[in-house]
Image: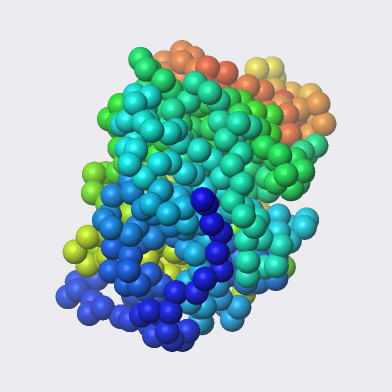
Amino acid sequence: MIVARALVILTLFAGTVIAETAPVPPKKTPANIVPSTSTKLFTSGDASYHTYRVPAIATTKNGTILVFCEGRKNSASDTGDIDILLRRSTDGGQTFSPPQIIFDDELNTCGNPCVVVDHQTGNIILLTTWNHGLDSEAEIVKSESIDTRRVYLTISTDDGQTFSEPNDITDSAKDPIWTWYATGPSNGIQLRLGPKAGRLIIPCDHKLKAPNQQYHSHVIYSDDHGLTWNFSGSTHDGTNECAVIECTDGSLLLNARRGRNVKKTNRITATSNDEGLTWSPSSFQNELIGPRCQASMIRYTPADASEKPIILFSNPASKKERINLTLRASKNEGISWPFSKVLHSGPSAYSSLSVMPNGDIACLFEGGEKHPYEAINFTTIALADLKKNNEKPLERQHISRKYPIADPNNVDMITDAVRTAPSVDFPQAGYEPNSPEKTAIIVTELIDVSQLHLYITAKIEEKGSILILAADHDQNTLSSSRPITESVTEGLVTWKDGWDLTAVQGRKIRLKFVLEKAALYSFQIK
């Protein structure tokens, strides 16, 4: 029988005040490493649990910090007797309550906590998975298991003090052709924009029945505050454990761990323009390297809303090893990540992010000195400390020539002055608006394309536009963008033949800007 309990484990967790620990720093500390101030909330071997794994953290509507994890009874294995545990903090992470058992089903596996706060009701929604304790992933995938992988839901209506009896929602949350299944782990989201505002979304992954046994990501969603659930379409082969955020235009961005069939050591992304029902073809996020490991991604939303939209991301920033847990921030919807801090340079693996009541960033992560699963640690960092001295100045691109299509004497000259657009704090080449009803063309010097994304800052008048083309040495067009008709600040260019400059990466190209009643203030490939 499955039991949801508020039983407090007292053994070895008697004190509620947590003492901070600070390991001896190495002789040479890289500049972007934060001195360790993490606190061990769950230490493997304590309280009759062999290993603690798979962290999930959330900040409730009332400001309470909830930290969840798996308590693995007899080994570090993903299979066997595993429970879901919780600790709470009502003082901003200074102290935490002793652990509560949220989901325990005798010798069976209760795992993969993924939590989302319903900001409309204040309820805390926790999704988990279940399988028979004797069943391994391989047996479940081959349909040779005692039971299958199931999805469970439990809800708290009292700020995380107690949770409801776990409820099996497998029939509505899992396609019958799926075998293996995992919720999250870490965080879900609630949509705040568009016609489906209020929708709860939980990132998940699954495997298909033989012969196609590759991993795929998907989400499950609820439009009635968690009472009923449905599942989305799948992403392409090779996407595994994932995280999702809502972009400022209402689209969704999914960021996934790579499956075993994927050799490239980068995170994989996909987008949705229909509130998570379907997903675009997958692409690689070249700036985000990582081993085959879970990562966390959330939107930073300050209380006073004074900051621009920021996305936070954490994972072991290493191509092969689970080491070097790094926190990153993006100001442009996950296209680039100019801010980063190493939170734990040693062995580290899964992590989960949340924003504290005071606006600081909280990270709950697996980490240790000799291996990643020695403890689940809690640490915080101020956004200002993450951003401090981290953004690299971008190189200036020089405009070499400008060609008018019509009368060359009736087009403004290029200004030699350096302009700074309102949200750009680095120098860029500037260009004054062309004359009304005239078309102007800017052609750059040859540029080495080492990165894949082009950003522009531009002002476009009514019925104006900018068209951008990539051209070879002789100005023959290689690729062209969709016409841009709205003024943009740090706007990412969308190309007709793709989302980036993959086709010309590693080559020298010229950029040609065709302007109709428009002003181009800056551009940058990054």
Q: Is residue 455 visible?
A: no
Question: Given the current orientation, which residue lies at the most extreme front position?
Answer: 1
Relative to 10, residue 122 above or below:
above
Q: Is residue 118 visible?
A: yes
| Colour mode of the rendering | rainbow
Q: Nearer the viewer, residue 432 or 47?
A: 47
Q: Nearer the viewer, residue 278 or 132?
A: 132
Residue 483 coordinates in the image, percent (x, y): 66, 23
**What is the number of callouts on the image?**
0
Q: Quadrant of residue 301?
A: bottom right
Q: Nearer the viewer, residue 272 or 145?
A: 145
Residue 37 coordinates in the image, percent (x, y): 38, 77
Q: Say which residue appears at 39% left-offset and 60% top-offset.
A: 71
Relative to 55, residue 271 above or below:
above
Decide if residue 275 is on the left or right side of residue 43: right
Q: Say which residue appears at 45% left-offset and 36% top-offset.
A: 149
Indicate the quadrant containing the C terminus: top left, top right, bottom left or bottom right.
top left
Residue 228 coordinates in the image, percent (x, y): 71, 39
Residue 437 coordinates in the image, percent (x, y): 79, 24
Q: Say which residue appears at 28% left-offset and 63% top-offset.
A: 50
Q: Nearer the viewer, residue 108 or 428?
A: 108
Q: Say which residue appears at 39% left-offset and 85% top-offset.
A: 19
Relative to 12, residue 278 above or below:
above
Relative to 172, residue 320 above or below:
below
